[in-house]
Image (tube, grey):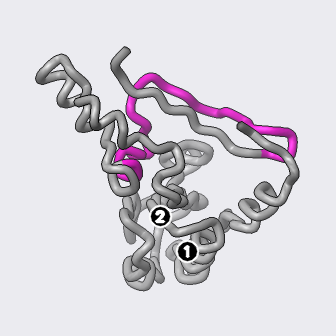
Amino acid sequence: KDGCLFMEAMPTKDGIYFYEMGYRISGGMTYKITEMTTDVNELKMLICYTLTGEMCEDEDLQKIDPYMNEKVAGSLAIPIGMGIIGNIEGMEEIKKIPEIRFITQYYHIGDRIVEKNLGTLDQLFARFTIIADGIEHLIDVVNQINHFLSVKDINGNELYVQRFNPQFFVDIRDKECSYE
């Protein structure tokens, strides 16, 4: 009856591929996205439940909107390769983009990414939380991040080599299939 459930999935040409789910708060801090788009914050609801035995009031349930009041949101994770970070460029420009609501930066100049970090969350340089007015707007923000951001090792080699291609959103959207 009470609690939080999340599922993480990626649309593919063959349908939706679910890769994580949990009966808990998501590690991606999606409660920040839902609070900004719908005024629903499951972290606050769980704290309320802990203190009072009730998750929320009935009127709070009416705020839940899976379409996020017609906004599009994303959490863009930035994986980087192995090395010692020698230079980071573009963060000041990225911080000025109003659609980027939160930035969680995990690594800084002088930090080392080693082989055991690859393929895990420890490979992420940063995570950008984006809220946009539509898919094209979201694509524009991702393109800006890709344009501005550079993370180089101490030898000048680029570590941000696996850039997300936002054209993926358009390709999936234009498929004639429904996932509802």
The boundaries of the magenta stretch are: 12-34
Residue drawn at x 28%, y 29% is: 58
Residue drawn at x 18%, y 22% is: 50
In this rendering, position of residue 47 left or right of residue 152: left
Can residue 168 be found in the magenta stretch?
A: no
Mark 1 lies on residue: 141
Q: Residues within 10 Å of mark 2 (few under 14, many from 20)?
A: many
Q: Residues within 10 Å of mark 1 (few under 14, many from 20)?
A: many
Above or below, 2 against 110 in this view is: above
User: Which circle's residue, 1 or 2, is located before the other in the chain?
Assistant: 2
Mark 2 lies on residue: 130
On the image, which quarter does residue 173 sit in?
bottom right
The one of 100 and 137 positioned closer to us in this rendering: 137
In this rendering, position of residue 107 left or right of residue 70: left
Residue 159 in sight from this viewpoint: no
In this rendering, position of residue 168 left or right of residue 153: right
On the image, which quarter does residue 141 sit in?
bottom right
The one of 173 and 76 positioned closer to us in this rendering: 173
Can residue 28 be found in the magenta stretch?
A: yes
